Image: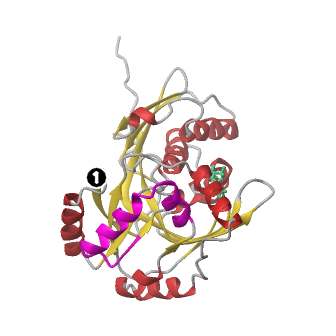
Amino acid sequence: MLSVVPTPVTVRVPSKVNLHLAVGDLRPDGYHDLHTVFQALSLYDEVSVVPAEQLAVHVRGTGADVVPTDSTNLAWRAAELMAERAARRPDVAITIDKGIPVAGGMAGGSADAAATLVALDALWGLGATRDDLAELAAELGSDVPFCLHGGTAIGTGRGEKLVPVLTRGTFHWVLALSKGGLSTPVVFRELDRLRAEGRPQRVGDADAVLSALGSGDAHELAPLLGNDLQAAALSLDPTLRRTLRAGIEAGALAGIVSGSGPTCAFLVEDQHAAVTVSAELAGAGVCRTVRVASGPVPGARVVTDTDPA
Ligand code: C5P
């Protein structure tokens, strides 16, 4: 008897850095109002889905051992939500290849959820619109809509309401990945604590950031990068100060903690600078590993042919 091996659908999904992250006060629902500028970076996860007896999640790559493979994984929840909307069983096996640092402040878990939505839409032939997917994405987590969207965008609300931003050219980044991770809710709570003590400064508005993005000039953008969560991440992991200093000493134009950290993102002049800064930073012994990336890049996209001949 011939057995037909099902063809998986594979989706590539980018990571993100917040070029500007203004955190408002704590809301009654436990979230903070944000005003942020996201940029999607070329550090990717790949998520494959294939029909299976029952829902399962497998994770491969660096940090895979600490990623849950049960219903607490956002990709699992994305499959359940998508199946519920399509009125069918979530009978798929999901394989996640991690290229995005785990618990690194680069939206790795959210990226996997966004990729799962896109992959299941293709696998099940649902024909969902990007707006349909964005609505499901917002139910799953604050950063999931951006991982779907990609590019550069302003995020408001919890971060889930997006408006695209016009940018010129490509920006080059060096990322210092940390040995450990930081929990996003813990970092937000630490910011609330620091604010109750009246310490950290707040970033201003994003107008200058948006005009620097429009000019495509990394030198103009560099001094404008800002993240309200940085003080909280540094308070929880003071070694990140050394990492940020080392990036500047290595020749980066500016360095910030990415989102809730602990990944540090360094903006550099061009591709050549990315190579030299990353080599020097890797030698400084201030992080687990160093990666080079560029942005903006598109959001979650199918990379396999879903109609094999
Ligand atoms: O939306 P998501 O599940 O990714 O958020 C994780 C946690 O991060 C929330 O439970 C909350 O503690 C914190 N958060 C927040 N304000 C936001 C986004 C996230 O306080 N705008």
Residue 259 position, x and y percent, is: 51, 61
Residue 83 position, x and y percent, is: 64, 36
Q: Is residue 221 left or right of residue 245?
A: right
Residue 278 position, x and y percent, is: 23, 64
Q: Which quadrant of the view contains residue 287?
A: bottom left
Q: Is residue 162 left or right of residue 95?
A: right
Residue 30 shown in magenta: no
Magenta segment: 229-255
Q: Is residue 74 left or right of residue 258?
A: right
Residue 38 position, x and y percent, is: 51, 68
Quarter of the image with the C terminus is top left
Identify the element where label 1 is drawn. Answer: strand
- Which of the pair 287/34 is nearer the observer? 287
Q: Which residue is at a point 73% across and 66% down the rendered structure image?
A: 25
- Which of the pair 225/163 is nearer the observer? 225
What's the image's color scheme?
Answer: secondary structure
Task: Give the prevailing secondary structure in the magenta stretch.
Answer: helix
Q: Residue furthest front?
A: 197
Residue 252 shown in magenta: yes
Which quadrant of the figure shows ligand 1?
bottom right
- How many numbered discs sit on the rendered protein? 1
Q: Is residue 32 above or below residue 183?
A: below
The type of residue carrying mark 1 is Thr
Q: Is mark 1 within 8 Å of ligand 1?
A: no
Residue on which the image places disc 1: 289
